[in-house]
Image (cartoon, grey):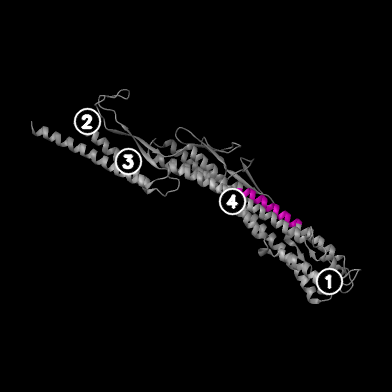
Amino acid sequence: MTDLLGIGYSGLRAYSRAMATVGDNIANAQTPGYARRRLDLMEAVGGGNSVFYRGSVRPGGVDIRGIDRSVDAWLIADSRISSSDAERASTRLGWLEKVEGALSNDNNGISSGLTKLFTTADLLTADPSNATLRAQFLDSVDDVASGFRSASGQLSGMADGISGAATTEVDRFNTNLDALEQINIGLRKARPGSTNEASLLDERDRLIDQLSAQAGVTATFDDRGAATLRVTGSGELLVGGGTVTPIAVTTAADGRLGFSIGGAPLAMTTGSLAGLSEAANHVADQRAALDTFANDFAAQLNAAHQAGTDANGNPGAPLFTGTGAADLTAAPLTTGQVAAANASGSNGNMLAIGAMRGAGDPEARWSGHLASQAQATASARAQDAAAATRADAAAAARDSVSEVDLDREAADLLRFQQAYSAAARTIQVARETMQTLLSSI
C-alpha cells in the first residue's frame, strides 16, 4: 500500500504542475517573446529498481524532469537575421520618403518657380517695358530662391532628426546590452528546469531579438543558457564573461553618422542603426547636390541677367545672392532694374534667357534630379517589401514552434485534469484497501 500511495502522490504532484504550466501558456498566449512551455515527465524508479535496471512489474509513479521551452535554435537565428534586414530596409525607406517629400514641388515650389521664371521671360520678349511682367519676373526669382531655402531647411531638419534618432537608438541598444548581462547573471543562478529559468530564457531571447533588430549581432550560449554577444561579421565582443562593451555614435558636420566600440570604428551593415546610417548618407548627398544645383543655377541666371541692360541703360545686376541653397536670396531689384534689353534690341536679353530652355537647362536638370530621387525611393520601397515578406515568413516559421495554440492547451488541460483525478482515485483506493484490511483484523 505504501507504493500505491507514493504512486498516487507523485501523480498529484506532477499533474498539478502540468496544469499550472498549461495555465501559464494560456495566460501568456499573447505575450511577446513567450515560448510555449511543456512539463517533461518521466517514469519514477520503482522500489526494487535502479537507474540501470527496471523491473517489469514494479511501477514507481511519475517524476518531473523540468520545464522544456518549445524553441528551434535555427528558426530563431533565421528570424533574427531577416528581422534585422527588414528593420534596416524599413528605417531607410522611411527617411527616403521624407526626402522625396521635401524635394517635391508641393513642399518647395522650385519646379513651378522655374517654369514661371522662364515663362515670364518669354512674355517679356513681346512687351519688355511692361511693369507688371517685370514684377512677375522678379517674383518668380524670389519664389525659386525661397523654394531652395525651404528644401534646404527641410533636409537640414532631417539630418538633425536622423542624428537624434541614432543617439536614442544607441542608448536603447546599450541599455539592452546591460539588461542582457543581468539576465546572464540570473541564468547562472537559476535552478535548471524551473519556471524561473524558463522566464529568464524568454527574456534573454526577447532582448537578443531587439538587439538584432537594432544592429547585426551573433549570439552563442553556455550550458546554463547565458549568452555571449558579438557584432556580426567583425566579431567585437558586446556581452560576455561579465563584460559589457557599449557602442557610441557621432555625427559629422554634414550629418553623416559614425559608430564606434571601445574607441574603434564600427561598421553597421544591418538593423535599424544601419538604416539610419544609410539615410544620413543619402540626406548628406542630397544637401550637397541641392547646394551645387542652387549655386550653378544662380551663377547661370546672374551671368545671363548681367549680360543685358535695364530700363535706365545700366548693366544688369545679379538676380541672386548667397553661397548655397540655405541662404540663396533674390536680390532687392526694382522693376526698372530688370535687364530685358541688350545690344540686339530692347528684348534681346529676355530672348537669350528664354533660349536657356532645352537640354541641360535648369528645369530639365531639376526634373532629372527629382526623377533620380523617385527612383531611389522606389528601389528602397521594393527592398523593404521583399525584406518584410521574408521577415514575416521567418517569424511565422518560428511561431509555428514557439507560439501557444489555445486549442492544444485546452486538450492538454483536459488530459491532465483527468490524470490528476486518476491519481487522486489511486490514493483513495489505497486508503479504502488499508481500512478494509485493518477492520478485518
Closest to the camera, between mark 3 and mark 1, is: 1
Of residues 56 and 301, the one drawn nearer to the viewer in this rendering: 56
Circle 1 or circle 4, nearest the eye: 1
Residue 81 in the image, given as x and y percentages of width and height? 54, 42
Closer mark to the observer between disc 4 and disc 2: 4
Toward which corner of the image does residue 159 lie, by quadrant? bottom right
**Kind of residue sitting beneath label 3:** Ala
Residue 290 lies in magenta, yes or no? Answer: yes
Q: Is residue 47 left or right of residue 130?
A: left
According to the picture, the residue beneath numbered tag 3 turns out to be 18
**Three-letter amino acid code of the residue under disc 2:** Asp
Disc 3 and disc 1 in contact, CB within 8 angstroms: no
User: SS class of the residue under badge 4?
Assistant: helix
323 vs 246, nearest the viewer: 323
The numbered mark, 1 or 4, whose residue comes first in the sequence reads 4
Image coords of residue 426 (percent x, y): 21, 36
Residue occupying image coordinates x 91% and y 69%: 344
- Residue that mark 1 sits on: 125
Measured Cα–Cα span from mark 4 to mark 2: 64 Å
**Residue on which the image places disc 4:** 91
Mark 3 crowdedness (10 Å alpha carbons): few <14, some 14-19, many ≥20:
many
Mark 2 or 3 closer to N-term? 2
Dot 2 corresponds to which residue?
3
Q: Which residues are magenta?
A: 275-292
